[in-house]
Every structure is written in structure tokens, then in C-alpha cells.
Amino acid sequence: MDAFSYLSVLLSIILGLAITQILQGFRDLMRARTRLRMYWPAVWWAGLLLVICVQEWWAMFSWRAYAAWTFQGFAVMLAQTIATYLAAALVLPELRDEETIDLRAYYYANHRWFFAMLGLAVAISIVKDAALNGALPRPLNLGAQLVFIGMATLVGVSRNERVHQVIALVAGLLFAAYIAVLFARLQ
């Protein structure tokens, strides 16, 4: 077994747990549908984060030829997946007994930590390239990552509902373009 195959197992497990968190959140929303106060940005971000998890796993494959693994380099990759998992743990509430689920209240009670973890995951991705490749990501990739960090920071500090709604839609469109331009093919 090569080093990447060995190391990617732990990263894949953590991303799998993140995906499980999101899917269980959707399951809980379906189960509580009669006592659910819907808030579409919360559901939107959960769906987008699901795509982000898959894209992160997809992009991980590009490291398969990297041969100079160190514990520090692996720790940076691990930190990115952990930040993604923590965002996934916050994106949707857990179902508790027969209580009403108010997605809007939950979203704003957790938005600062959620967007901090999301922005941190992207920032760590930049550090990962610098640490493992000795250079920043390609300009288009770096530009997109900086825009995503900026959006996460903006919605992390804002409580303005309109800002949250607009940034959610813009982030979804930009992330779809990001995948189409940079990650459409497995590299």
C-alpha cells in the first residue's frame, strides 16, 4: 500500500462522518416535518456543505502522486477535514423528542461557529498547498478560495437576514462554477 492510500483512509473516514452528519440532519428534518419551522438558508447551506464534502474528497485524489509525506503535511490535510466535519456538525440541528425545530433560530444561534469552521477549512486548504507544494494554489483556485473566505467572514459576522440569503445563493453559484472550472475531471 502506498502512503497516499494509507493516509487517505483517515481523511475519508472524517469526510464520511461529515456527510453522515448532514444526511442525518436532513433525515431529522423529514422526521420532524410536522413541527418544523423551515428556514431555507439553513437547508441550502446544508446541501452546499454536502457538495463541499464530496468536492474535498474528490480533490484529495490529486495528492496521490505526492511522495514527500511528513506528519506536519498530513496534519494540515487532517485539520482541513476536521474543520469541514465541525461545520457539518453545526449546519443542522439534532432531533430531540417532540420539540419544535425552528431552523431560523438554530441557524442564527450557530452561524458564527458554522461560518468560522467553513472559512477555516478553506484557509487551511490554502496553507495545505503552501506546506505540501511550497507554493500557493494556482491563481484561479486561490482567488476563488479568498472569495469564499471573504463570504464566510461576512455572513459569520452579520446578522442581517438579507445578507445571509444573498450570500447563500451567490456561494452556491460560485461553488458550482468553481467545481465546473477547476474540478470537473478527476486529476
Image: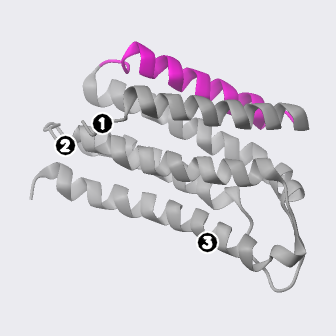
Q: Which amino acid type is marked by label 2?
A: Arg
Main SS, magenta residues: helix
Q: Is residue 136 magenta?
A: yes
- Dot 3 falls on a residue whose secondary structure is helix
State left or right for residue 117 relative to residue 30. Answer: left
Give percent across and percent down for residue 13: 38, 64
Q: Is residue 103 magenta?
A: no
Q: Position of residue 48 (x, y in %)?
A: 60, 47
Distance from the alpha carbon under mark 3 to that under mark 2? 30 Å
Q: Name the outermost residue toward the left.
A: 1
Task: Report the side of 136 relative to 92 (left or right).
Answer: left
On screen, 81 above or below 93? Answer: above
Task: Indicate which disc, 3 or 1, sits on the residue closer to the N terminus.
Answer: 3
Name which of mark 3 and mark 2 comes first in the sequence.
Answer: 3
Could you say which is closer to the camera, residue 120 or residue 28?
Answer: 28
Mark 2 Cα shell of 10 Å, populated few (<14), some (14-19), many (≥20) = some
Residue of label 3: 24
| Dot label at residue 64 | 2
Mark before the other along the chain sequence, 2 or 1? 2
> Is residue 157 in view from this perspective?
no
**Residue type (three-letter) at the residue carrying disc 1:** Arg
> What's the magenta region?
135-159
